[in-house]
Image (tube, helix red, strand yellow):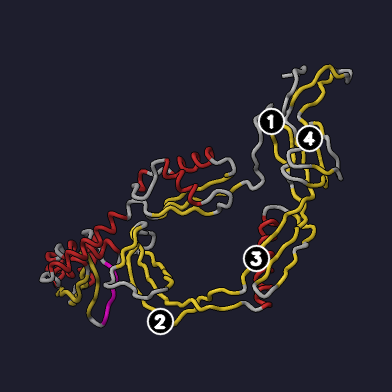
Amino acid sequence: MGFGTFFRGRVRIKVNGLGTERFFNICKNNGIRIYNLRFEDNEAYAAMSIEDFRKIRPFRSAAGVHVRIADRYGMPFWLYSNRNRQFFVCGIMLFFGINFFMSRYLWRIEVEGNSYYSEKTIIEFVESLDISYGTKTSDISCYYIETALRKEFDKITWVSADIDGSRLLINIQENEDARFTYEEGEPCDIVASKDGIVSSIITRSGTPIVKAGDEVKAGDVLVMSKVDSLNESGESFGVKYIEADADIILETEYYYNDYLDRSYEKKTYTGREKERQGIKIGDRMINYNIGKCDFENYDVFVSYESVKPYGNLSLPVTYAFLCYKEYEMIPSEYTDEELDSLLNEKIDKYIENLQENSVQIISNSVRIEISGDGAKAEGAISVRESAATKEPPVINEIEGTEE
């Protein structure tokens, strides 16, 4: 039974008599809709709406059949049977009314496919378009959102916005190779951002003043924007400044230093727990349990369950299940093996972060020294990386230039 049928109500009738078939033919010819018609022995069963049932009295007399109601179902009959429970009925009707009303508004924005731009950045921009939680979904233009996102964020190459119930789903694809470039015609030098040795240099524009194997300091110019202006004969008649462009890899070092005390306080859970429930509305948590947790030290573990009365309807309300776990801080000491393992994990994490930033590791000379009080890790990590930046050229004298 559909949702609309439930609200309107339906009856199931039992028909017997010699004119049963004639009765149903008369109903059909007069626009009476019959559902689930079936015959059992000398009786027929069928379903119809309440409105149609009220129209069949002359038809049953004309066909000479007996019609009785076998069953009733739907909202009208449910309300009648609960007519003495007014507050309960009103509450149910109010619940469905609120759900129907809330389903017409936006209560969730989700972003998928993003890596360069954070979800918070995308959502804040969408909200700047006067599209936020509580906006009527019929007033939201997905095409407008897609166009605005492509225009605002240069790394977004494709975007799709869809309304799914009370949710706005934004799928994007980013151009990971896109990078910032200077305005066309703006002169700039390429300088070293740290000390190192030039591993390789490929110049596309500008005048290189270093070569592979040269040692450079932070701030040294590697490729100058100053170039000679040549005539058709290849003769220089002045200088001009352009945007220098080159791929430069430097061999450099990162100094690593870390220390870990042998003594520490270990968090140990006692096994005592307390559970609470709450409701989260927006960013506000409402704990409706009486009494607070009386543990001196505890961690709170929270899990959420969305309130979804119907498939695509997502309300800005979530059930919260809180678990308070008591713990004690017990004085402890690391063993030599634990100190070594923990420091090595931190070193590996540091190197992993470097590699995620396109830094190539050449060698690792970090050493761990363990003593009675703790352990320290110290040493250098040799790497190859693009350690160059673009800066405006310094022009110390007036020279002939070409625009």
* Residue under the image location 63 percent in, 68 percent down: 260
Side (left or right) of 281 relative to 155: left
Q: Position of residue 284 (x, y in %)?
A: 34, 59
In the picture, the disc for residue 78 is none
Which marked residue is nearer to the observer: mark 3 or mark 4?
Answer: 3
> Separation of disc 4 and disc 2 at Cα?
66 Å
Residue named by callout 3: 259
Identify the magenta region: 35-40
Q: Position of residue 354 (x, y in %)?
A: 69, 56
Neighbours of disc 3 within 10 Å: few (<14), some (14-19), many (20+): some
Q: Is mark 3 on a helix, strand or loop?
A: strand
In the picture, the disc for residue 223 is 4
Q: In which quarter of the image is the C terminus?
A: top right
**Does residue 374 show up magenta in the picture?**
no
Neighbours of disc 1 within 10 Å: few (<14), some (14-19), many (20+): few
Which of 362/164 is in front? 362
Side (left or right) of 146 relative to 97: right
Looking at the image, is 243 positioned above or below residue 291?
A: above
Mark 3–mark 4 contact, CB under 8 Å?
Answer: no
Which of 265/84 is in front? 265
Residue named by callout 1: 392
In the picture, the disc for residue 272 is 2
